[in-house]
Image: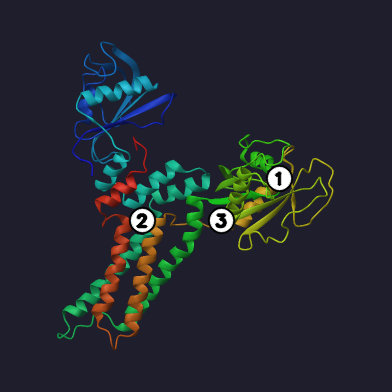
Amino acid sequence: MFSVTDTIVAIATPPGRGGIGIVRLSGPEAHAIARGVIDRDAPLEPRHATFVKVRLKPDATTVERLGAIDHAVVTLFPAPHSYTGDEVVEISAHGSPVVLGAIVAAATAAGARVAEPGEFTLRAFLNGRIDLMQAEAVADLVDAATPLQARAAFDQLDGTLTRTIAEIDAALFDLIARLEASVDFPDEGYHFVDPDAVGAALDTLLARTAALLTDARRGRMIREGLVVAIVGEPNVGKSSLFNALVGAERAIVTEVPGTTRDLVTEVVDIEGIRVTLVDTAGLRDTADHVEAQGVERARQSAAVADVVLRVDDQSTDRRTGDHDGKSSPHRKVVYVATKADLPAAWTDSRALVVSAVTGAGLDVLRRAIATALDVDLQRDRPAITNVRHVALVDRAHRALTRARGAVSAAASLSEEFVLADLADARAAFEEISGRRATDDLLAHIFARFCVGK
């Protein structure tokens, strides 16, 4: 793992040019190093934005003998009242990669080390500013592609899941303490808890973990998104529909059958849900080896998609599509009739009529996709979305189920069996919060963070 005593530095804003760019320093020497980069001799005032010039000493590695290079606003956040819990200085300069890189180079020349991915948030976790669930929510919030994803991530960053897990863990700890007391003093006549009370307490805990697991499906849908495949025969308007839903010309559209020969994907926001939209090759028998591979990939995509859009051309009387859903018997199918801007050769009450040219029917189609995905956006946002958390809650639920069975068989099983299962459940909750986390686990989690966060 990383050293927590170094002073680290990184650009905290996205790569590229922008109006503002931020360089962040964190560590015991952050204030001293920052003062060596700016033209201010007096100490910085805590939590006070200070307008300064950024200066580069002659030994700066990227720019030599330039003196002042930019105006900037510098803010000091003393420990422990900062994002990381260490001393933090943020230098807000113009968003030029040259300027920001020169500031980082000057800071490293003064003794800072370039931060690793997620190292600022890791320090916040290690310093007790946030727990591991909240740290993971930071990455989810940065990666959010829809407003619903952002709200779910912020709820976890704000501590909703932390509080839920803490309440369950506190009740579990109390039950373990009373059982251990009964085991430790068997001959003194102390009865800290009776089997009926243990069973009732376990039933409550099982109900709470079961509720989390039930909600987890919606949570994972929101966090990870779902897949919608557009399938149909050649030239029925699949790629045009794909482009219309994406809002950009991502797929090639021509009158030549078989133009699309591979899967084209794009992440879109469908009624607040993150959806990976897949345009596929036209389904037909072909002697072309390359196109045949595309057709096979189209069938595979339809087989694994959460929802299939089965597309037909309403302007032609040649209708050969799968209208019974036989190609995807276990998938949800939304039937779509395209080219509504042209005279209709047939109608079908099950098919949603749309036009990629005029946009007619697209809003209705988006709502139909959201309905088929079965994500109720009107309900409260889910408390649990992360697959790691789901696996650990499931482990705790199974341990509590075993403990409940041991209580029911109290006549033949010792209380030590119940305690062993309760300890396993509590260990799972401690892994979720990070109170029990290995270096390998932390490295794996924080590796997905961007540098500067």
**Secondary structure found at label 2:** helix
Residue 372 in the image: state x and y as whole percent: 63, 57
Q: Which residue is mark 3?
A: 304
Q: Position of residue 156 (x, y in %)?
A: 41, 51
Q: Nearer the viewer, residue 227 or 3?
A: 227
Residues under numbered marks 2 and 1 in contact, where contact means CB atoms less than 8 Å apart:
no
Label 1 crowd (10 A; few <14 / some 14-19 / many >=20):
many
Tell whether 212 sits left or right of 79. Answer: right
Comes first in the chain, label 3 or label 1: 1
Q: Which residue is mark 2?
A: 162
Real-space Cα separation, disc 3 to disc 1, in angstroms: 21 Å
- Depth check: give the residue in front, 361 or 130: 361
Three-letter amino acid code at the position of disc 2: Thr
Answer with mark 2 or mark 3, whichever residue precedes in sequence. 2
| Mark 2 to mark 3 CA distance (whole Å) | 34 Å
The image quadrant of residue 448 is top left
Sequence-first tag of 2 and 1:
2
Q: For this rendering, which residue is in front, 196 or 423?
A: 423
